[in-house]
Image (cartoon, rainbow, N blue to C red):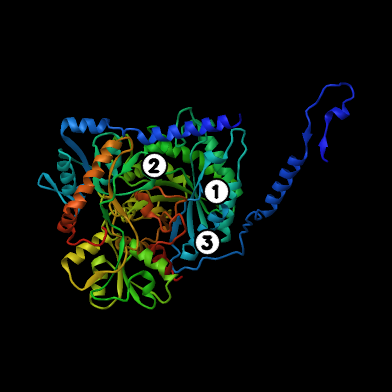
Amino acid sequence: MNILRLSDSSPQTDREWPSFSLRPGLHIFFLLLFANLLQPPPLLITPGPQQTVETSHPILGVHTRLTDEVEEWKVQRTLEMVREMGAPWIVEFFPWAYYHAEDGGIAWSHPDMVVKHAHAQGLKVIARIGWTPGWARPEDTPPTYLDASAYDDFATFAAAFAERYRGQVDALIVGNEPNLSFEWGYRQTTAADYVALLREVYPAVKEANPEMVVLAGALAPNLEPPESPWATNDLAYLEAMYEAGAADYFDGLAVHIYGLTRPPEEPPAADRLNFRRVELMREVMVEHGDEDTQMYITETGWNDHPRWTYAVSPAERIRYTLDAIRYAEATWPYVEMMAIWAFRYPAPTHKPADYYTLVTPEFIPKPIYEELKTFTGN
Amino acid sequence: MRRIPLILGAFLSLLFLLASGCREPQGATWQRIEESGVLRVGVDPTYPPFAVAEGGDVRGLDADLARAVAADLGLEAQFTYFGFDGLYDALATEQVDVLISAMVVAPHRMKDFAYSDPYFNAGQLLLTPAGETEIEEMRDLRGRTVAVELGSPGHMAANQWQRRVPDLTVNRYDTPDAALDAVAAGRAEAAIVDGISARLYLGANDGVQVAGDPVTVEPYAMVVRIEDELLLEKLNESLDRLQESGRLDRMIRRWLGTRIGGS
């Protein structure tokens, strides 16, 4: 019945036109319509009621890894679990390169989503800003590459970020581990180069949002010899930062401190990497009259990989982690927060790094998560 | 007429499948090994009782296995030491022919590497007091107490089983041995401990036994580059012969004190 013969409506010619049937098309249309009706509605994720973090250890934080987490429910679940564990702080990486277009447009949707859920869970957010967009660096350089020609672009983005998340993001870290050449795209730099970046970023952020705490660092602990092409000793680098006039351009110092195979109470030494290296960093700050400036440990922790050289046993990892929190609370009034690296990865790395996490990619809490939860009174 | 392309397609597919099935395994590496008479083995010599460097030599289950496989194939094993982190890189860059170093079969690496048949299972085991007959699997732990090493995969497994087994109490200890001591002393009715620690304990202590099948599986296997199909075939054939002759069992007993089920 639904056969349409084009020749019937084409009186101009006697030519035989091919015939078309609408029936198969209609069948497909209704089939697709039916299939569409069978689909579940899209997942509706709402931030839910405003939560607060219950904890007996307000110093505790975690470094989350939500940068590459696409699904909103996973972002929300991660942050819920952080709150339920009793950690009031998160540190999260917000890559400048992901959001900022050359024409000045900024794609805020993903950071909006992360910040919204963190705020709803009552978490304090420290945002690490880094990674240079392709348009702001030479061709064939990695995203970590940053040179002075792009400092003002970096400052523009950091200021926009600070303004947008006023009251929702508490602190902003300028870059990451600037004492490693890797973090500059293997460009050889000095502490003075980093201070030059701070000089651009700090006033821009403060003008956009005076409440935003600007953190310098975080310095990577290392024992590299002078002139190493890979890294500058963190203590020497901090010293050089002060000599280059950094003090006026940050509100707090971010540091990374890993215990490796050593217990948290082991005394510090300049030639040894351990948890109490914080105290040596503090000495440099005090020597430069910066004792009023707080420190933020934005990465710390122990690893319990069964075979990695720098790992401890699972039981030691738990004990060292809890003892480290107790030690920091009792001994370091100048440390505002300490974040355990890392809460959860979106997917396994299949490397020893997986043994730093507190929760598996499938959201299964590891025993250390449960121990921390109990420790914070939850 | 329409059937002709169909028949032709089916024929070509069959031909392709047969050709694939009959393809000779690639054997350039094996040819070189045969010519040199040396099997280059990558090992991390810091992992007792599988491999430990001692006085210029390497000792342990993996060292014995490597020597036995090499001898079985008419070769000499030549060991090169690497840190655990560097083993796969060493194999990929052809510094060695095979890794025999307590390597866990890792599906995500199978694009670049191939694994032999497993020769050992290091997964978590359920252990009970000697003579205990009522507990054969995790479900039998209802209303009972299980001992684990704090923070270990066994602890994690026990926590997950707590959701399925009513009234399961999990007691944490600092080491696997302490967890097994608790079972032997009657302070816990079972323990979940990794296969290596359990075997070492059973080799030196009475009072505890393995119950049922492993709770988790963590197979150790030899690793070769993905293209070295003929070498893999030879290694598997050799492993079969060592298994059938009982030599593999004897090696496991020598270094781990005991052999359990299908380990």
| Mark-to-mark CA distance, 2 and 3 | 38 Å
Amino acid on which the number 1 mark rests in the picture: Val
- The answer to whether residue B190 is above or below residue B94 is below
Residue B259 screen position, x and y as percent: 21, 61
Amino acid on which the number 2 mark rests in the picture: Met
| Mark-to-mark CA distance, 1 and 2 | 37 Å
Mark 1 vs mark 2: which is more N-terminal?
A: 1
> In which chain is the residue bearing label 2?
A
Question: Is disc 1 placed on a helix, strand or loop?
Answer: loop
Which mark is on residue A80? 3
> In which chain is the residue bearing label 1?
A
Residue A154 screen position, x and y as percent: 52, 38
- The answer to whether residue B33 is above or below residue A49 is above
The C terminus of chain B is located in which quarter?
bottom left
Residue that label 2 marks? A241
Residue A335 screen position, x and y as percent: 40, 58
The answer as to whether the residues below labels 1 and 2 share one chain is yes
Residue that label 1 marks? A70
| Mark-to-mark CA distance, 3 and 1 | 17 Å
Frontmost residue, A178 versus B133: B133
Question: Is disc 3 placed on a helix, strand or loop?
Answer: helix
